[in-house]
Amino acid sequence: MKPLRWPDRVSVTFIGRLLILSCAVTPAAHAQALQPTAVLIQNVRIFDGTSDRLSAPSNVLVLGNLIKTISKTPIAPPPGTSVRLIQGGGRTLMPGMSDMHVHIFMSASSQAQLMDPKVSFATLEARATEEARLMLLRGFTAARDMGGPVFGIKRMIDMGKVPGPRIYPSGAMISQTSGHGDFRMPKDRAHRFGGEITRGELLGIGFIADGRDEVLAATREDLRAGATQIKVMAGGGAASAYDPLDVAQYTLDELKAAVEAADDWGTYVTVHAYTPKAVRRAIEAGVKCIEHGQLLDEPTVQLLGEKGIWLSLQALDEAPATQTDAVRAKKHQVVQGTDNAYKWAKKYNVKLAWGTDLMFVPAQNKNQNTDILKLKTWFTPAEILKMVTHGHADLLALSGLRNPYPGKLGVVKADALADLLLVDGDPLANLDLIGDPEKNFLVIMKDGKIYKNILR
């Protein structure tokens, strides 16, 4: 027999210790470790994500990561389960909320910090990881990230190593040269003309891609990294210095390239666009969702409704005085167009989603909940709550086979994923309750795990 090499000795020793430890575990302790966990929430009135009213007092059993049973009568947990009891006290149980337009990485740092080569990626990612935690504690159990390097954060959340929402990542935003994702300084040459790769591209915030071949490559890079949908810049933007709001970006063939590559992977393209020209070109290319759209005319909004294309809209604020006059003027146009966009979207039954689109000002992130309250100008509390729960789940499902979280989201129903909020009051009667999550969200659960409980 050959003598044991060092790695073999380590393996044998390790296995021996495991055997000793397994013998030391009592049968009772072993059985307890294997018990499935359950959470029994008693005496709650349920907003289920689809109804206009609360249920009668009910009890809800969560087993593992699923809602197992909902009943108006007492529920007996299955035998052999370890049960955690929550006394609802007649409060409201509702689905976790979702935000359809976030930039977790870019919202956690200022633009100057993001562009500063002395600030490491690790530092920026650590800030974004903390922002993901705070987002969950604001009651957002899912978020569609519309651009930025969040794949690592998503993996850590999904592995249970850090808290945060279910992230549907787009990866790097795809922009043409001179497009909304081209944040080069005037002195920076394009890399194809002797310049260097931009800081934004190095961080994974965006790709600058021109022509069908480059757009295909950029789309496939995002899909390879784990994108659940693709974000393309199809028109000018308010926050960028060098592209006017009125310009259309990418030719029809370039947009079709992104759509075809995404479709081959069973998912879809959403585009940043404000104007009728940009949106109509995107529709012709086969895009399934429009981000923004505040400058659309009524016929184009009607076209969205007829074709069943989503409009992911935001009720944005005016730009702060610290911005340049040009940026403030562009942002003012967007804000002024919001009212018509919402009214026409309602008129033509457009599939509507809501998002915050907060970036570069970390102190603003705490306004995520109060931003929902702006929707009261156009919608009832029930319409708003249905939009930010079950309605958004329908949009997330467009990711098809790229959906990392298969199952029913945005509802409180049997066999749905257990993403739940216990609200101290009735948000259908007083929507303002969701504007103060620290005070009014007493329990926050995601995937059957409790991340906040102040009813102890």
Image (tube, grey):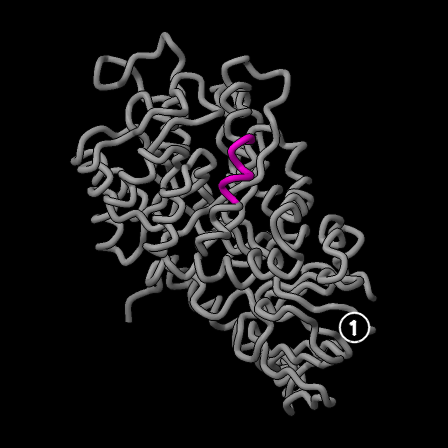
Q: Is residue 339 magenta?
A: yes
Q: Name the foreground residue: 70 vs 124.
A: 70
Evaluate whether residue 227 shows in this view.
Answer: no
Q: Name the foreground residue: 62 vs 79.
A: 62
Above or below for 373 versus 28: above
- Residue 60 placed where, x, y %? 67, 79
x 62%, y 65%: residue = 95
Q: Name the foreground residue: 323 vs 203.
A: 323
- For residue 170, side relative to residue 238 (left or right): left
- For residue 368, side relative to residue 424 (left or right): left
* Quadrant position of residue 275: top left
- Residue 288 placed where, x, y %? 33, 51
Numbered-mark total? 1
- Residue 416 placed where, x, y %? 53, 73
What residue is pinned by disc 1? Answer: 88
What range is drawn magenta here? 335-342
x 31%, y 29%: residue = 248
Which quarter of the rendered picture does the N terminus lie within?
bottom left
x 67%, y 57%: residue = 381
Which quarter of the rendered picture does the C terminus lie within?
bottom right
